[in-house]
Image (spheres, rainbow, N blue to C red):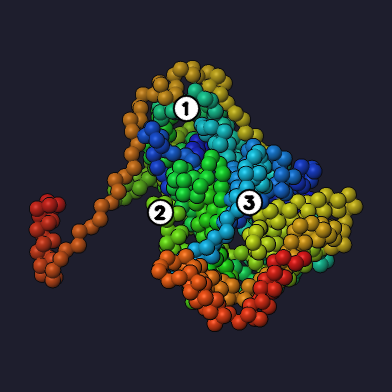
C-alpha cells in the first residue's frame, strides 16, 4: 500500500474527531477509522457536554452544533425508599447568552457525526464500518494500523488510539494491562420521549434551559454510583451508572437497577407517560488518576477513554477531557512533524500538555474519590437513610411537643452514629473531594 | 463492454419507518441511508463481468438530493469507474415514469452494452423504473434475474430467472436491460484502497437542463401517478385467551373460527 498518512486515528468519537479536525486544519493527511455504522453510533453518554475545549476546536460551535439544552440548574438528590432531600442550584448567570455555562445536554448520536463532519470538511478521510484489529510495527515502533478490510494495512507516522474504554490497541501496544473490575463503571440509559412543554413544566424550565439531576442512595440500591436525568429538548436521558463491583456485591444487573431508579416515587412522576426510544449500556473508565496508563509509545498516542480520561467525581466529565486529549495529541504531532521525530521522546509533549491542563490536574485532585467511595459505602446507603429518617421525624406533624421530637432525634443520632468515626469519615470525604 | 448500473439511495433496512405528518412521504429524520440492496447485486454483477472480460467501464447513475452522492461514492469504493448524479430541485416528488424519462436521457448519452437495475427499490417497492427505461430506450429486458452469462463475442447474454416451480432461461441480444434479484451474486465489501480511491474517481452532476428535459414535465405537479396517502400498518390487537379446560377451549376455538373468523 503506497498511500501513507501522516496520522491514522482509530475511533471517530469526540477524542478522535477533535484530533482529526485539528490535524486536518493544520494540513496534515489524516485517516479516521470508525467501527460503527457512523460516528456516534456506538456511544454511551449520560448527557451533559462541557464545551470549553469544543469552543477552541470550533469557535462559535453553539451556532451549528446539535445541542439540546443549556444547563442552568443542577440538582443532587439523596434518597431513601420513601423520601428525598435535595440540593439544587440554579443561576440566572448561566442563562444569559451562548455559550452560557459551557455545559449543554446533547445526544451523542447527533453530536459525534457533526464533529466528525467538521473534521471531514477540514480534509480528514473518515472511514466508517471498519474495525482496526491491530497495529503495524517495525523495529519496535508503531508504523500504522491493520484494518479489517481487503488491503487494510495502512501506514502512518503516528497512530492515535481513540478506540474507547476497551481500547484493544492500548492493550496490543502493551501500554495498558487488563483492568480490574473496580476501576470500571457500567452505565445503562434510556432515552425517554416527552412533549417539550411537559419537560419544561415538570423540571421548572423555560425555553432551551436544561437541568442535570443526579440521585444517590436508595434509588440506586445504595450502590457506589448514581442515577441521572438530563433534560433534552423533547427527550430525557435517564440512567444509572455504578461501579461493576457494586453490581456484583448487590447481585443486581444494570437493567434492574435502572428499573428500580425509574420506579422510585420521586422519579416516576418525572418520567410518567414517556415513551422509551432507545436503550444503551456501556462501561465507563472511572478508575481515575491512578488508572491512567502510559499514553505515549513510539508512533502511538492514547486519547479519551482509551487513556482512561474520565473525571467521575461530581462532574461526570468525560467528553470534554476526550476532546482536550485529542486536541493535545494533535498539537503534539503537528510540532513533532516539524522535526520529523515521532518517537516516544519526540511525542513527550503530549503528556506534559495533559499534566499542565485541567485534564490530569482534575484527575489528580480527585484521585482519592474512587478509593474513598469504595471504603465508605455508608455514604451511599446508611447515612442517606439515617439523614432522611431524621428529617422525616423532624417534619412529621403530631401532638408530640417539639422539644421531645428533637430530643428523640439527638438520641437516635447518638445510637446510630459513632461520633469519632463519623468525624473521621467526614474528614476523608472532605479530603477526597475538596483538598488539592 | 460499457455497463451502467442505476442505483437508488434508500433508508437502511433496519430503519423504523413512519409516515410524515402530511401522510404524503415518510419521516426522514434520524434515518440512515444505504444503496438499495437489489442495486448492489447489479453493481457486483457489473464488476464481475468487467473482471471476467478483463476490460470494461462501469458507470453508476442515481437521481436524488445532495445526500445521494454518498451512495454513488459507496459504489465507486467497491469498484465502479465513474458516477453520474442527476440533481435538480424540479425533480422533487417525481413518479417512476418521470424518473425513467430522466434516466433514459442520461443513459442514451453513454452508448452502453448493459444496463442493470435492482428488481425493485426496498423503499417504495414499485419495481417500475427499470422496465420503463427498457421500453423508452427500445431495448430488450429481462427482469429479476438470478444468473447471467455474457457471450461477448456474439454480443448476446443468457439470463436465468426463477419462476414458479422452475427456472426460465432467456437469451437476449445486447445492449439489454436487466433487473437483479438476490442470489445473482454476493456483493463484495469495499477494500480500503478502494475507499480511498473513490474520492478521486469522477462524479459528474447533471441537471435537467443538461439532459434537455423541461422542468415542468417532471416533479410532483406533473406526476402521472400521485401518492394519495401513506399510513402505518394497523397495530396488532391483543389476543383473546380462551377460558376453561382443554375440551371447552377447543370447542370455543372451533366456534370462533366458524362464527367470528368464518374460516371453517
- Kindly check if marks 1 and 2 are in contact, taking CB atoms under 8 A apart as contact: no
Which chain is indicated by disc 3?
A
User: Do the residues at pointers 1 and 2 share their chain?
Assistant: no
Q: CA distance from mark 2 to mark 3?
A: 25 Å
Q: Is residue B138 above or below residue A372?
A: above
The residue that appears at 38% across and 32% down in the rendered structure is B22
Q: CA distance from mark 1 to mark 2?
A: 41 Å
Q: Which residue is disc 3 drawn over?
A: A49
Q: Is residue A89 above or below residue A58?
A: below
Residue A230 in sight: yes
User: Do the residues at pointers 3 and 1 share their chain?
Assistant: no
Residue B190's mark? none
User: Where does the image place residue A38, in percent across and percent down from the top left?
Assistant: 58, 49
Instruction: Kindly state the secondary structure of the residue where label 3 is placed.
Output: strand
User: Where does the image place residue A382, in percent across and percent down from the top left?
Assistant: 54, 75
Q: Which residue is disc 2 drawn over?
A: A272
Q: Nearer the viewer, residue A217 or A252?
A: A217
Which chain is indicated by disc 1?
B
Residue A137 in sight: no
Q: Nearer the viewer, mark 1 or mark 2?
A: 2
Q: CA distance from mark 3 to mark 1?
A: 38 Å
Residue A45 as seen in the image, left or right of residue A55: left
Residue B92's mark? 1
User: Do the residues at pointers 2 and 3 share their chain?
Assistant: yes
Amino acid at each position: 500500500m503506497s498511500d501513507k498518512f501522516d496520522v491514522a486515528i482509530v475511533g471517530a468519537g469526540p477524542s478522535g474527531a477533535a484530533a482529526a479536525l485539528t490535524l486536518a486544519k493544520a494540513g496534515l493527511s489524516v485517516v479516521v477509522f470508525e467501527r460503527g455504522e457512523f460516528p456516534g453510533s456506538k456511544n454511551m453518554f449520560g448527557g451533559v457536554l462541557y464545551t470549553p475545549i469544543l469552543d477552541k476546536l470550533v469557535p462559535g460551535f453553539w451556532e451549528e452544533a446539535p445541542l439540546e439544552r443549556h444547563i442552568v440548574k443542577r440538582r443532587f438528590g439523596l434518597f431513601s425508599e420513601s423520601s428525598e432531600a435535595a440540593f439544587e442550584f440554579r443561576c440566572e448567570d448561566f442563562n444569559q447568552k451562548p455559550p452560557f455555562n459551557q455545559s449543554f445536554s446533547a445526544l451523542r448520536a447527533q453530536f459525534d457525526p457533526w464533529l466528525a463532519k467538521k473534521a471531514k470538511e477540514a480534509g480528514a478521510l473518515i472511514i466508517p464500518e471498519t474495525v482496526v484489529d491491530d497495529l503495524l510495527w517495525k523495529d519496535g515502533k508503531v508504523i500504522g494500523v491493520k484494518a479489517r478490510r481487503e488491503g487494510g494495512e495502512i501506514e502512518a507516522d503516528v497512530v492515535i488510539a481513540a478506540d474507547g474504554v476497551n481500547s484493544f490497541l492500548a492493550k496490543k501496544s502493551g501500554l495498558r494491562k487488563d483492568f480490574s473490575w473496580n476501576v470500571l463503571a457500567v452505565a445503562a440509559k434510556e432515552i425517554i420521549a416527552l412533549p417539550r412543554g411537559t419537560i419544561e413544566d415538570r423540571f421548572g424550565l423555560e425555553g432551551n434551559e436544561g437541568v442535570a439531576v443526579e440521585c444517590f442512595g436508595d434509588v440506586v440500591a445504595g450502590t457506589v454510583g448514581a442515577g441521572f436525568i438530563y433534560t433534552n429538548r423533547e427527550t430525557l436521558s435517564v440512567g444509572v451508572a455504578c461501579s461493576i463491583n457494586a453490581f456484583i456485591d448487590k447481585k443486581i444487573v444494570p437493567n434492574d437497577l435502572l428499573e428500580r431508579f425509574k420506579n422510585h416515587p420521586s422519579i416516576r412522576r418525572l418520567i410518567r407517560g414517556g415513551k422509551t426510544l432507545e436503550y444503551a449500556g456501556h462501561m465507563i473508565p472511572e478508575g481515575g488518576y491512578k488508572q491512567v496508563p502510559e499514553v505515549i509509545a513510539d508512533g502511538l498516542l492514547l486519547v479519551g477513554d482509551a487513556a482512561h480520561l474520565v473525571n467521575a467525581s461530581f462532574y461526570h466529565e468525560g467528553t470534554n477531557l476526550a476532546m482536550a486529549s485529542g486536541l493535545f495529541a494533535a498539537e503534539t504531532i503537528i510540532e513533532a512533524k516539524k522535526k520529523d521525530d515521532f518517537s516516544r521522546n519526540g511525542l513527550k509533549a503530549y503528556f506534559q500538555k495533559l499534566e499542565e491542563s485541567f485534564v490530569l490536574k482534575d484527575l489528580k485532585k480527585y484521585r482519592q474519590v474512587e478509593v474513598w467511595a469504595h471504603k465508605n459505602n455508608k455514604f451511599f446507603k446508611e447515612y442517606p437513610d439515617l439523614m432522611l429518617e431524621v428529617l422525616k421525624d423532624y417534619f412529621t406533624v403530631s401532638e408530640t411537643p417539639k422539644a421531645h421530637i428533637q430530643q428523640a432525634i439527638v438520641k437516635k443520632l447518638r445510637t446510630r452514629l459513632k461520633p469519632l468515626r463519623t468525624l473521621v469519615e467526614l474528614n476523608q470525604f472532605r479530603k477526597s473531594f475538596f483538598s488539592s | 463492454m460499457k455497463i451502467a448500473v442505476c442505483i437508488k439511495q434508500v433508508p437502511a433496512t433496519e430503519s423504523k419507518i413512519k409516515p410524515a405528518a402530511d401522510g404524503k412521504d415518510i419521516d426522514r429524520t434520524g434515518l440512515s441511508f444505504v444503496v438499495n440492496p437489489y442495486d448492489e447485486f447489479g453493481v457486483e454483477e457489473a464488476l464481475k463481468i468487467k473482471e471476467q472480460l478483463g476490460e470494461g467501464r462501469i458507470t453508476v447513475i442515481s437521481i436524488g438530493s445532495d445526500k445521494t452522492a454518498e451512495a454513488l461514492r459507496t459504489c465507486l469504493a467497491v469498484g465502479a469507474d465513474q458516477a453520474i448524479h442527476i440533481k435538480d430541485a424540479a425533480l422533487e416528488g417525481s413518479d417512476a415514469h418521470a424518473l425513467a424519462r430522466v434516466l433514459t436521457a442520461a443513459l442514451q448519452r453513454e452508448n452502453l452494452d448493459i444496463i442493470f437495475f435492482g428488481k425493485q427499490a426496498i423503499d417504495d417497492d414499485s419495481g417500475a423504473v427499470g422496465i420503463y427505461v427498457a421500453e423508452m430506450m427500445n431495448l430488450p429486458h429481462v427482469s429479476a434475474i438470478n444468473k447471467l452469462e455474457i457471450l461477448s463475442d456474439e454480443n448476446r447474454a443468457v439470463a436465468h430467472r426463477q419462476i414458479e416451480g422452475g427456472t426460465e432461461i432467456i437469451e437476449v441480444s445486447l445492449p439489454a436491460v436487466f433487473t437483479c434479484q438476490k442470489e445473482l451474486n454476493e456483493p463484495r465489501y469495499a477494500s480500503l484502497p478502494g475507499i480511498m480511491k473513490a474520492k478521486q474517481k469522477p462524479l459528474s452532476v447533471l441537471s435537467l437542463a443538461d439532459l434537455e428535459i423541461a422542468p415542468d414535465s417532471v416533479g410532483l405537479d406533473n406526476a402521472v401517478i400521485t401518492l394519495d396517502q401513506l399510513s402505518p400498518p394497523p397495530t396488532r390487537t391483543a389476543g383473546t385467551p380462551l377460558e376453561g379446560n382443554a375440551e371447552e377451549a377447543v370447542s370455543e376455538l372451533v366456534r370462533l373460527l366458524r362464527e367470528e373468523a368464518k374460516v371453517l
